Image (cartoon, grey):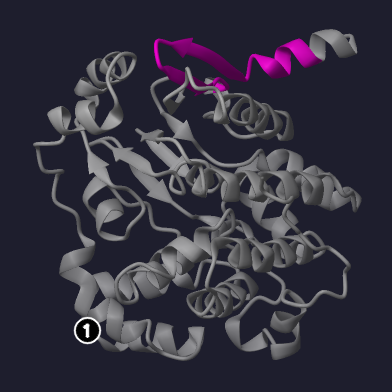
Amino acid sequence: MTPETDAAAEAEHVLLAIRGRTAHLTLNRPRALNALTHAMVRRIDEALTEWEHDPAIETVVLTGAGERGLCAGGDIRAIHDDARSGGTASADFWRDEYRLNARIARWSKPYVAVMDGIVMGGGVGISAHGNVRIVTERSRVAMPETGIGFVPDVGGTYLLSRAPGELGTHLALTGTPVGAADALLCGLADHYIPSAQLPLLLAELTSSPVREALPRHTHQPPPPGELAAYREWIDDCYAAETVEEIVDRLFATGIQEAKETAETLLTKSPTSLKVTLKAMRQARELATLEEALTQEYRISCAALTSPDLVEGIRAQVIDKDRKPRWSPGTLGEVEGGVVERFFGTGGGQELGFPSVD
């Protein structure tokens, strides 16, 4: 391919359309579950720049092509290759992605994120920071980073640290996907609409403001979730100071679901678990999303030089043997200095945010 055809192909990965008073962003990599590339992030940002001060555009709607979901996250194969080669492409990608997350959070017009189907990692970043977030009976929302030797990013620590009790800590450490009811409970979404009604809602938004169209479709309750019933043992166990103590408390409850949760945690990267717990606790004390994204950027850049990121992606995505060989291999072997390295600025990687007009 020539550079021109490469650019044209990349442009087709985010489809832009204006229908009446609504501008549509459609992630269009259905075979890759709409995984985000750097070019896609740039195209979304450019579109928002164009539409922000356009008086003809009242609403922005984000959807994903295909039947499987909105977005499965970033292109982790590309991150794997970059980390193996010692490159800087991932750090450049995250810089623009995290800035886009912050921009979406302060978007002045209705930003309607249709979180139908799978919404994970980077997909959460471009949807759950919006001001109108819709889930359906098909929604599966997750931050599964600890399973690939990474840490929740795209503002995930900010969102999850503000969930009720310790529910966010549970989701951050385990990476457990949640359905509509639990996404609403944890503050990751605002409205439940059955998927069959989405085409009608989107059609109405071409001529009606969100505040008028949305209430006509939000009368049904979502299917029941699970987290409310687990809240007592989750709050007690995850209030512990260390991951080791969290695991011990989970095993000691005598509750089958808690035992299974402990076993799940022991399959994740020990380093990622400890860094995630510290990131979550610190995110609770941060006043703004931008501060949390700044912390996450330092952590993400440090993860590029951690053996667990390459190994985790290899095991889950490249070879798919589902048998990662973590280094260190146990929680007890992860020393404090290893964790602190993820929070330092010694690598010179800082996020920074462009000035806002």
Residue 185 lies, in percent from the top left, at 25, 59
Residue 34 visible in image: yes
Q: 29 or 23: nearer the eye?
A: 23
Above or below for 64 versus 226: above
The quarter in which the N terminus is drawn is top right
Q: Classify residue 61 as left or right of residue 152.
A: left
Q: 278 or 18: nearer the eye?
A: 18
The quarter in which the C terminus is drawn is top right
Q: Classify residue 270 as left or right of residue 124.
A: right
Look at label 1 and name its amino acid: Gly
At 67% from the left and 26% from the top, the residue drawn is 43
Q: Classify residue 246 as left or right of residue 3.
A: left
At 71% from the left and 61% from the top, the residue drawn is 297
Residue 262 lies, in percent from the top left, at 39, 75
At 47% from the left and 68% from the top, the residue drawn is 173
How would you rate the neighbour count of disc 1 (Cα within 10 Å): few for under 14, some for 14-19, many for 20 or more? Answer: few
Residue 321 visible in image: no
Residue 5 lies, in percent from the top left, at 81, 8
Residue for badge 1: 254
User: Which residue range is magenta in the image?
Assistant: 7-29
Residue 203 shown in magenta = no
